[in-house]
Each structure stands twice: as C-alpha cells, then as structure tokens.
Amino acid sequence: MAADRTAHRGGRAVVRRAGRDDAARRWTVRLSSGGVLPTLGFLYGWTLFLVIQTGTIAAVSVGFARYFGALVPWIADDHYLIAPVHLSTGYALSLSTTQVVGIAMIALLTWTNTRGLDYGKIIQNVFTTAKTGALVGLILVGVLLGWNHTAVAENFGNLWAPRGTVDIVPGLTALTAFGLFVAVCVSQTGSLFSADAWNNITFTAGEVKEPRRNIPLSLALGTVVVIGLYLLANVAYLVTLPFDQIQHAPGDRVATATLNAIFPGLGPTIMAIGIMVSTFGCTNGLILAGARAYYAMARDGLFFRSSGTLNGARVPAWGLVLQGIWAAFLVLPRTYNPATRAYGNLYNDLLNYVISAALIFYILTIAGIFRLRRIRPDADRPYKAFGYPAVPALYIAGAATILLVLFIYRAATTWPGLIIVLLGVPVYFAWKPKRPDTATRSLRTRG
C-alpha cells in the first residue's frame, strides 16, 4: 500500500543526531525563509502540516488498523465506542475500534520519536527492511507459484482490446485518443500519492551523514527501487489473476486476492501481516520526517515557537507532539453519504486534495532551479540537477499537464486542495516576523 513512503537509502535510514554537525545545514534549502518568495515556502509548510503529512499519517494509521482487524475481529469500522455524531448531513465524528487503534499507533510512534533519533532510526531500519522483503516475497510467490496460463493468455494475449471501460466524465471514455490521454493523467493520482513522500529525506538534511553524497543517492535509489518493485508487483498480479478478478477484487485489494489464489484461505492473513508491517514503518517515517519541517518553520518565526526547540534527546519534541495531535484528530471525522447511508473517512477526501496541492509546489520547486541559475550563476552548487535543463523542463511540462487535466476533469477533489493552500496566505502575514532581520538572526544561531 505505502511501501515507498519512507525516505531511505538502500532500505536503511541514514540520518544522524540533530546538531552534531551544523555544516550540513548550509546545504539545506530553507523551507520558509530567505531565497525567492518566502510566502510560497510557508504555504508548502502550511499545507504539509494541515493536509499532506498529517492526513497521510492518519490514512496510513487507519490502514494499519483495518488490516489488524483481519486478525482481531474486535477491530472494525462499525464497532463504535462513540457512535457517529453528525455535524451536518455529510459529515460526522465517531470513535470506532479501528480509529482507536490508528490513534494509538500515532501516539506510540510519536512518543518513540521524542525519545531520540536512535529510536526512530531503529524502527525505520527494521520495518523498511521487513516491508521491502515482504514485497519481494509477494513478487516471487506470484511469479513462481501463482503462474496461471489462463490469466497470462488473457492479460497479455490481446493487449489492445478495451475491457471494463467506464466514462471518465459523462460522454468521455478512454476509447478515444483524447479520452485515453485524460484517463492516463487522471489515473496518476493514486501512483503519485503512493510515491509522494519520496522527498522526505530532504526534511532531515541537517541530520544526514555526508549529505552531499547520501541525499541525492537516497532520492535516486529510493525512487528507482520503489518504481521497480511496484512494476514487478503488477506483473505478479497479472500472471496470477485474470483481468476481471483484478478489476473486481474485494475492497480493491488485489495483492490479497493474488495471495488468496495461491494460498486459499491463508492469503488474507498473510497479506494483512505484510500490510501491517508496511504501514507501521511508513507511519514512523512520516512522523520522523514531518516534524523536522515544522522545526525549520518555527526557527524562522513562522510556526509555533515551541516547535523550533530541541529536547534533551536532540529532537523537535513539540513539533512531533503537535503533528501527532492534529494527525490523530484527522482520524476522527467521517464523511456520510445519505443515499447509501455509508460512512467514509474525511482524510480520504483530504488525500485527494493532496496531489494537486503537492504538484503545484513540486512545479514551483523545479522552476526555482531555473531562476537560481539565472540570478545566482556563480553560487556554489553541491547538489547537481541531473540532465539540466532538459530533465527539469520535461518534469515541469509533465506535472503541469497532469495538474491542468485534474483541475478540469477532477474539479471536486482538486479545487479544494488549492483553497487549502490559499488559506495559508493570511496566516503567513499574521505569523510573519515583524522585523525583517529575525529570520537572518535565526539562521546565524544555527551556524
């Protein structure tokens, strides 16, 4: 589910204690001060705290709890300790056993990370290794034991035959060239969300050993390994299950259906354990990295002051606590569909908003490379932009195209993301240090 949402190098954490060597911080791009248009840096941090990081933590923690429920039936979405209390016709608050387990995991991992980087690092290394091994195991089992000649013939025998198509919007299907283009762009939201934390290693740049070497290596290896594993996992699904079974897998859990086809009756249990390992390690990585961003903002006077201090274990404990409280709160709200009388989760909507918001900031970040090359041509550049200018330009063009299509064809879950970002503008000017030299002094105190 989220096996790639942990910043890593070769599956191992490479961060060190905060404050051990401030030289690394000189190469860290400031999130919320200095440089060009600091407002945009703050808006990313604002959106990160409000939706991107905390919403993802909430989603993954409840994902852990739901799969835990496959092993412990007491844990269920409809087993309420506090029944839904409606705030409106479409929204409610509740506390189910699933939500309790999700909140408990957030609290546990927040606490362990406040104890020091070594605790978070050990958890990250163990669970990153375990979940990567589990995914490799799934691939090998699917290809070696699950090979189904009927499924292979159906899935690979007639690649261009349309099957199971539905309208993207009324009157537009993937059966036309333009419809196929739109479908490809729209379908990127799931994969983009799965890989959205590929850059979290940069949040801990000041704590990374040999940052000039390890940060680019982590970003490159992590991205390549994750994409490779995901592609191979899809091969395992396609050689095991016919297309119809993939398309209609119960709860959209294709991996579970694959293992159940190979090990009848045991598949759901095996997959539940694998997903629990994956989501536990994923949540830890998100919690560890996110607080470092709020720490940088607070040091520039643009977040709660307490988040800009380190505790006795040399970690931003208050940033971790604030992040944990908000993420735990996001577990509680529920959406409600009056037509079906079914409850959903608010963070599912928030996560749909995340992708459009994140793409905006990624485009601006890459565009910043071109601007800095122009206004600071002689600046020292310890990190190189691979393939400049062609690769960055292609990224901007591709991301902008996907974003435009989402704004047009997925307006209900795209425009709200932009609104969340823009809500941060008045917050920035309210929080902005009154004296312009505050950020400069803040940077000097850090070396």
Image (tube, rainbow, N blue to C red):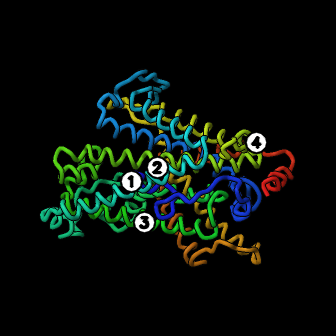
Image coordinates for residue 169, horizontal then vertical, percent: 37, 52
Residue of label 3: 225
Give the residue pinned by disc 2.
Answer: 282
Amino acid bearing label 2: Cys
The numbered mark at residue 131 is 1
Please tell me whether residue 19 is drawn above or below residue 116 in the rendered image: below
Between disc 4 and disc 3, the foreground one is 3
Contact check, label 4 and label 3, Cβ < 8 Å:
no
Earlier-in-chain disc, 3 versus 2: 3
Residue 310 is at least partly visible in this image: yes
Is 21 on the left or on the right of 227, as rendered? right
The residue lying at 76 percent from left, 49 percent from top is 300
Return the disc, 1 or 3, that comes first in the chain's sequence.
1
In x, y percent, where is residue 258? 23, 53
The answer to which of 42 and 3 lies nearer the viewer is 3
Give the amino acid type for the residue marked by disc 3 in the picture: Val
Residue at mark 4: 431
